[in-house]
Amino acid sequence: MVVFMEIHMTIRELVQLIRINSGITQKELAELSNIDQGALCMYENGKRTARLGKRKRLVDIANKAGMNIKYTDIQS
């Protein structure tokens, strides 16, 4: 039996998950994602939300790091 589970997370949680699982700094994630470090800081602190294109970039980075996250898992 295969069980599918939906995951819902905020952009804040996604940034934290990527950084913790990959062991990288905000600066390194900013360079990988081509997103301004100041914007990433605001996402991670819950002070700002990311537009769709930036959310997709972060999901792609998470998936390259072995996480299985869909674009639809991220709440705007």
Image (cartoon, grey):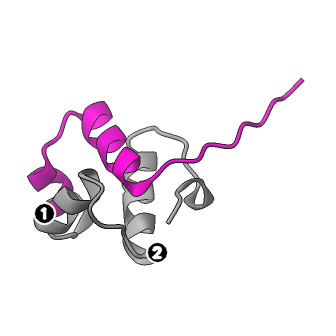
Q: Is residue 27 highlighted in magenta?
A: yes
Report the disc number at residue 52. 2
**What residue is shown at x 12% (from left), y 63% (from top)?**
37
Q: Amino acid at mark 1?
A: Gln
Left or right of 6? Residue 27 is: left
Which residue reaches farthest front? 47
Question: 45 or 23: which is nearer to us?
Answer: 45
- Amino acid beneath label 2: Leu
Residue 69, above or below 2: below
Position above or below: 33 against 5? below
The location of residue 58, given as percent across then percent down, is: 37, 59
Q: Residue at x 30, y 55 (%)?
A: 46
73 sits to left or right of 63:
right
Near mark 1 (Cα within 10 A), the count class, few <14, some 14-19 or many ≥20, is some
Q: Nearer the viewer, residue 46 or 60?
A: 46
* Left or right relative to 25: residue 52: right
Query: Is residue 26 magenta-colored?
Result: yes
Which residue is at the front of the view, 4 or 8? 8
The residue segment tinted magenta is 1-30
Q: CA distance from mark 1 to mark 2?
A: 17 Å
Image location of residue 7, percent across then percent down = 61, 43
Q: Quadrant of residue 47?
A: bottom left
The front one of 69 and 13 is 13
Q: Which mark is residue 37?
A: 1
Q: State the quadrant of the N terminus.
A: top right
Q: Using the image, determine if residue 1 lies above or below residue 55.
A: above
Q: Label 1: state its secondary structure.
A: helix
Q: Residue at x 32, y 32 (%)?
A: 21
In the rendered structure, which disc, 1 or 2, sits on the residue that comes first in sequence?
A: 1
Mark 2, secondary structure of its residue: helix
Residue occupying image coordinates x 30% and y 42%: 16
